[in-house]
Amino acid sequence: MGGSASGMGRSGASGGRTWLRWLLLIVFVVGLAFTFVRLGEWQLDRLDQRRHRNDVIARHEASPVVDYATIMNRPLGEDDQWQRVRATGTFVTDRQLIVRYRSNDGKTGWEVVTPLRTTDGRTVLIDRGFVERQPGTDFPTVLPEPPAGEVTVVGHVRRNEQGDEKATTPQQGSIRLINSDALATWVGTPLVNGYIGLLEVTPPQTGGFQPVAVPALDEGPHLSYALQWFAFTVIAGVGLVILIRNDVRDRRRARERAASDQAADRAGETPAGSPHATTDDAVDSRS
């Protein structure tokens, strides 16, 4: 009776620990699954954004060139980007800046941004294009001069780039991000919101500039990433079920072994090899 009560006590304590382990495991897996699902949803949201951007680019690339003032007369939104516009004016040559650490079509290099004072009296920033940085060379300290006199530029509407204040503030003639709001004080005049990414200028410029490439019209890896996160959610759930099922199976087998041993004890026939077998039992078995 004492042994049975002790066994029941141990069984109860073991059962309590098992339930606690299961509870903690369930809480952990549910939290993990929630995180995986949110990450998957985030990737799907990125996919929707990518598709919308692609639609905007395709629509603007198929539309005719318009006067810059019809678009760049307000704070620019994402749907304004990559529309081709035209502007006529004169470059402000003493307010040029090199834009460091740029990439374009898989290459790294720099760009030059120069204000254009338009014929309608406003000033708009022009990103004159990309120049590949050759291995072993530093960024230039003398920038190519823009065409003199009145010019006509055609380019893409671009939103202000956002980032750390140090990246948008001119330092020793250079910046890392183009932001008209941040540059207005340095230029010394109010600037049109956003900037124009140059495609062509008449008369033409020199300096080896390449137009900044339009983003590739693909969907990127977002769908595959989302499916991976959702797959991780399923794996976590299946793993939880398997672990609990194995626990249940092991506990059932342990109960069956304990019941078998108790039945043998009551019959006075402790099986050889049982943990309850004595030395005399083993001798008798060998006899």
Image (cartoon, grey):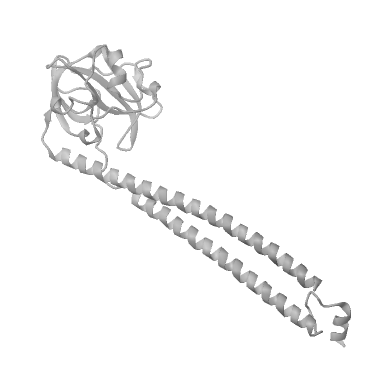
The answer to whether one can see residue 91 in this image is yes
Quadrant the C terminus occupies: bottom right
132 lies left or right of 199: right
Placement of the N terminus among the 4 image quadrants: bottom right
Residue at (53, 61) in percent of width and height: 240
Residue 140 visible (yes or no) = no
Seen in the picture, residue 37 relative to 279 is either above or below; the reply is above
Q: How many numbered discs?
A: 0
Q: Quadrant of residue 216?
A: top left
Residue ID at (33%, 44%): 46
User: From the viewer's perspective, is residue 84 above or below residue 273?
Assistant: above
* Residue 202, placed above or below residue 227: above
Residue visible at 17% across and 24% down in the picture:
73
Please, is residue 82 above or below residue 8 in the view?
above
Residue, x 59% and y 67% (percent of image)? 246
Rendering quarter of residue 210: top left
Between 1 and 215, the one lying in front of the other is 1
Q: In the image shown, does 261 or 79 lie closer to the viewer? A: 261
Residue 226 in the figure: left or right of residue 56 = right
Across and down, in percent, residue 155 comes to: 18, 29
Q: Position of residue 285 (x, y in %)?
A: 84, 85
Q: Decide if residue 111 is on the left or right side of residue 251.
A: left
Quadrant location of residue 188?
top left
Q: Position of residue 243 (x, y in %)?
A: 57, 63
Q: Position of residue 237 (x, y in %)?
A: 48, 60
